[in-house]
Image (cartoon, grey):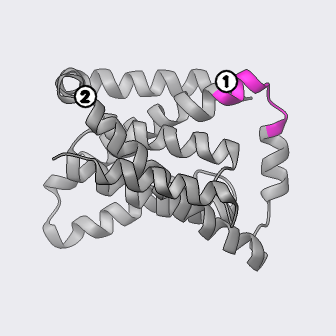
Amino acid sequence: MVEATIIIDVLMAYFIYRSIYKGKLEVEFNKFSFNNIMYMLGLGILTYLICANIGYAIINSGLTQGLDTYQRSINGSGLIAKLLLVTMVAPIFEEFMFRVLLLSVVDSIRPKFKYVYVIFVAFVFGSIHGTLYHAVIGTLFALILSFVYLRYKSVLNTIVLHVVYNILAITGLGTYNGISFGILLMIATACIALHKK
C-alpha cells in the first residue's frame, strides 16, 4: 500500500513540476541559502510544537475516532517505505499539489475571497490525512504552510518546513510536557532569531 502511494505521489509531483513550476524551481534553488534552511527549521519546529500540543488536547478530549485503525494501517508497512513516504515523498508531493497547484491561482482571486480560498485549500489538505484528529492538525499546519508559501513565494521553503515537521511527528519529540519540548523550543527560537532578511 505505502509503495503504491510513493509511486503515485512521485509521478503526480513530477507532472505538476513539469507543467507548472519547471523554470521557477531553478531560480528558487539559486536564491535558496543556509539562512533560509535555518529559518524554515526553526519555523518547522515551532509549528510542530504548536500542532503536537493541540493534538494532545484533542487526544485528551476523546476525539480520536479511527486513530487506532489509521495507526495499524501505517504500522503494517515496511520501515524504509514508511520513512521514505513520510519524510520525503509526501512533503514534496503535498507541497507541489497544495501550494504550487492549488495556491498558484490565489493572486488571480478577488482580494476579499483570497482568505476563504486559502482556508478551503487548508481544509482539503487536512481532510486527506484520514482521521478527525489528523484533519484538525493538518488543517492548522496547512494554514501555516500556505502563509509561508504566499509570503515567500517559494515551494522549497515549505518543503523544508514540511520535512522538519514530519520528522518530528514520526519521532514524537517535543510533545506534551517532556524536556525535549523545551530544547526544541530553544532551537526554534534561535533559528528564527538568527534569520537575516
Q: Is residue 37 above or below residue 50?
A: above
Residue at the far bottom: name it: 61
Q: Quadrant of the N terminus?
A: top right
* Residue 124: percent from left, percent from top: 48, 57
- In the image, 81: left or right of 9? right
Q: Which residues are magenta?
A: 75-83
Please tell me whether residue 82 belongs to the stretch shown in magenta: yes
Please name the amino acid that badge 1 sits on: Ala
Which amino acid type is marked by label 2? Tyr
Q: Is residue 113 left or right of residue 128?
A: left
Q: What secondary structure do most residues of the magenta stretch adopt?
A: helix
Mark sitting on residue 21: 2
SS of the residue at dot 1? Answer: helix
- Identified at 32% across, 25% down, the residue is 17
Residue 52 position within the rendered picture, expressed as x and y whole percent measured from the top left: 61, 61
Mark 2 residue crowding within 10 angstroms, few (<14) / some (14–19) / many (20+):
some
Tag 1 and tag 2, C-beta contact below 8 Å: no
Q: Which residue is mark 1?
A: 4
Q: As rendered, which of 40 and 81 lies closer to the eye? A: 40
First in sequence, mark 1 or 2: give its number.
1
**Eyeballing the image, is 192 above or below 100?**
below
* Residue at (33% x, 61% y) in the render: 118
Q: Is residue 150 visible?
A: yes
Q: Residue at x 26, y 47 (%)?
A: 195
Distance between mark 1 and mark 2 Cα atoms: 24 Å
Label 1 Cα neighbours within 10 Å, binned few <14 / some 14-19 / many ≥20: few
Disc 2 element: helix
Question: Does residue 65 sit above or below 168 in this rendering?
Answer: below
Residue 73's x, y, as percent?
A: 81, 41
- In the rendering, at what x and y percent does residue 33 appear? 25, 30
Q: Is residue 126 magenta?
A: no
